[in-house]
Image (cartoon, grey):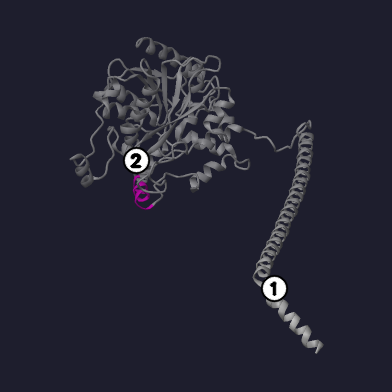
Amino acid sequence: MYTVLVYLILLTRVQSFPFDQFLHDQSDSVLNFLKEQSRQVEHALTSSYDRAVQVKNSFDSYVEEQRNKINTEINSCIENVKDRGRQIADSFTYLPTEEADAKLQNPDVTLTVPARVARNGYRCETHTVVSNGYLLNLHRIPHSKNDRKISPKTILLQHGIFASSADWIMNGPGKALAYVLADAGYDVWMSNIRGNRYSKEHAWLKTNTKSYWNFSWHDVALHDIPNIIDYIMKLKGEGTKITYIGHSMGTTILFAMLTLRPEYNNILTAGYALAPVIFMSDFKSPIKSLASVGKNVAHMEMLYGSHEFLPKNSMFGEIVSSCNVDYIDDKICKNFIFQLCGENEKQYNETLLPVFLSHYGAGTSWKTVLHFAQEILARNKFQQFDFGPSNNQRMYGSDQPPEYDLSKITLPIHLYWARNDLLSSEKDVKMLLDKLPSTTEAYLVPDPKFNHLDYLWAIDASTLINSQMLSSLQSTFEDHL
């Protein structure tokens, strides 16, 4: 009974309980609880992220600090090694002695022309002229050692066959023509023929191709020297006076140019021909006996060979180079030169032989050599390249190549010749003199033994050649002021 009464009382209370209000109140509490839990979770996550960032930053800072410390230690180690190296080097540098074989016995053997000129205390410039794609390098000594003024009086020096601008400085200051002219106040330009060691490059042709080596001195006369003269005139401007001085093949080029491009008779002030090689009827060098054979060899080389005449890596090039070696008796080389060019023991400078041989054989084409062989066989003719009857017809409209018309030459010419020159004989020089204007002057070198190469390296070059030439040049330029 008691249990029933309790149940009835509880039922009555439940029925009277505000259940909806209770649920509403509990719902707010639950929401608030959930929000609080969410906030606490978010706070915990944020705190964890911030802590993680702090840990990462601390780690990065530690790594950077250690890296800087390591770099500092490495750099310090490197500097210590460098300092030690410098100390060791200095200790050797200032020793009173040096290695026995450390010095070059003759630096002129290995130095280039600009380096040799600079070594002798002169300023040297290199100018490049593009002619038919060939990049021709000119070496210029614009003034003397002591006078920086550049004169309008300009000299263009053209070397001979197998040679380079080195010809004009080989004999050293006081004797070599380039230095003598610079000291006298002239602006000196030394050209280098296409294909030699200083003018080997081409704008589009490879140097080991037939197309590259398809030229003779005719092409140099027709294109290269006129382009060089034009370049100098344009660079120096109005009032520039240019005198041309050539040696051996350099004279051949001059006379061919004055006939092919007669306008340059009025542009140049004068032409000086040292050992002129124009007519070759009385050619006394043993080379003459090789002309007919050489002609055939040249044809074969032009068709099937290297196209370059006896490059440094050829057998002949090796023989020439061997003359610089002690175990080869230099007398053999000296006598070989005397046989080809004329003997002159008195003017022979033995110390210059290695220098000469190191720069000789600078490079040229078989076609150039063949053109000279044709001149020897033609005897009394100064003519263009002989391509053979059928090709001559196509090239010239005649079976025979045309002769260069020397009557077109009006430029004042000065001929320098020597009785013992086996490549430029008295007979051939006088034959040339007869075909030039009456104003042409001829100077016989006052040494009966003077030979073809003595113009470049004679011991007494100053008294035999230079003094007379300076006097003549002074008169030449005075006439054009």
**Where does residue 76 sit, x and y in percent of width and height?**
78, 42
Residue 360, can we see it? yes
**Residue positioned most to the bottom:** 1
Residue 280, can we see it? no
Amino acid type for the residue under numbered disc 2: Phe
Height in image: 473 above or below 205?
Answer: above
Look at mark 1 in the image and give the residue it sits on. Answer: 17
Q: Which badge, 2 or 1, comes first in the chain's sequence?
A: 1
Q: Tell me which residue sits at (30%, 32%) in the image.
A: 222
Nearer to the camera, 358 or 428: 358
Look at mark 2 in the image and give the residue it sits on. Answer: 215
Secondary structure beneath dot 2 equals loop
Picture quadrant of residue 200: top left
Q: Tell me which residue sits at (38%, 20%) in the image.
A: 243
Magenta includes 37? no
Height in image: 190 above or below 64?
Answer: above
The magenta segment:
295-304
Nearer the observer, disc 2 or disc 1?
1
Mark 2–mark 1 Cα distance, whole angstroms, equals: 127 Å
Picture quadrant of residue 376: top left
Which quadrant is the N terminus positioned in? bottom right
**Where does residue 262 sit, x and y in percent of width and height?**
26, 25
Nearer to the camera, 38 or 412: 38
Magenta includes 296? yes
Our reading of the magenta stretch's main secondary structure is: helix
**Residue positioned most to the left:** 397
Amino acid type for the residue under numbered disc 1: Phe
Q: Tell me which residue sits at (48%, 48%) in the image.
A: 314
Secondary structure beneath dot 1 equals loop
Number of other residues with Cα within 10 Å of mark 2, as a class: few under 14, some 14 to 19, many 20 or more: many
